[in-house]
Image: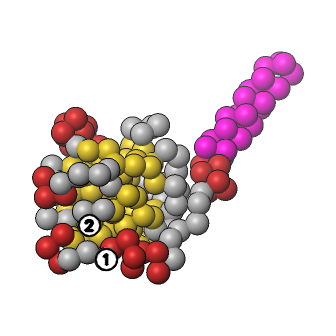
Amino acid sequence: MKILFLTISHTLVLTLGFALGVYFLPIIVAERGPSAAEVAAATAAPASQRFEARLRRDLKGSDTFHWGEGRITVTSNAVTHEGKLAPGPDYKLYLAPEFVDDEATFLKIKQQSLRVGEIKSYDGFIVNLPAGTDITRYKAVVIWCERFGEFISAAAYR
């Protein structure tokens, strides 16, 4: 009986420790968010090549641990975010051909979407676009947790 109790208690403690590590490690190693001057420089573009949108916490696929809020700006050179993201590992930014608001819908169009880069900050970010990216071919940005296949947030910019 003592061995069974010790096995169960140690398994629970290890599981809890692992779960806390998965949650807190990305927060600990996150890069700092961009300054206002860095965002202004990255979003400087003619009006015809600049789109804005909002990330909202209340999307169908967002929840307590997977959400984003704030302003997204898309230019021909970069995507910037001024706001907050729920912390997590392995976040990727995609340009999508249509707006999606949950995991199942994004998985249907993921192959047609363009993965543009990694998100390493939860207090805003700047992700440079690959050279030659035609932002008018896409209509939305999607933030996706690649490691766990989780929808974080999205915003329609066109």
Residue 90 vertical position relative to residue 157 in the rendered view, above or below? above
Asked if residue 3 lies left or right of residue 30, the reply is right
Asked if residue 134 lies left or right of residue 93, the reply is left
Name the image quarter holding the C terminus: bottom left
Splitting the image into 4 quarters, where does residue 125 fall? bottom left
Name the image quarter holding the N terminus: top right
Magenta span: chief secondary structure: helix
Q: Where is residue 139 in the image (x, y as percent from the top left)?
A: 16, 57
Q: Nearer the viewer, residue 138 or 105?
A: 138
Kind of residue sitting beneath label 1? Ala
**Helix, strand or loop at mark 2:** strand
Q: Nearer the viewer, residue 23 or 95?
A: 95
- Badge 2 density bin: few <14, some 14–19, many ≥20, Cα 10 Å: many
Kind of residue sitting beneath label 2? Thr
Q: How many labels does the image show?
A: 2
In the picture of the structure, the residue carrying the numbered disc 1 is: 44
The answer to whether one can see residue 88 in this image is yes
Residue extending furthest right?
A: 2
In the picture of the structure, the residue carrying the numbered disc 2 is: 75
Name which residue lies at 60% across and 57% down: 30
Q: Position of residue 55 (x, y in %)?
A: 32, 66
Asked if residue 4 lies left or right of residue 154, the reply is right
Splitting the image into 4 quarters, where does residue 153 fall? bottom left
Q: Do the residues labelled 1 and 2 touch (CB within 8 Å)?
A: yes
Residue 129 located within the stretch drawn in magenta: no
Q: Give the range drawn in magenta.
A: 1-22
Residue 74 vertical position relative to residue 36 in the rendered view, above or below? above
N-terminal-most mark, 1 or 2: 1
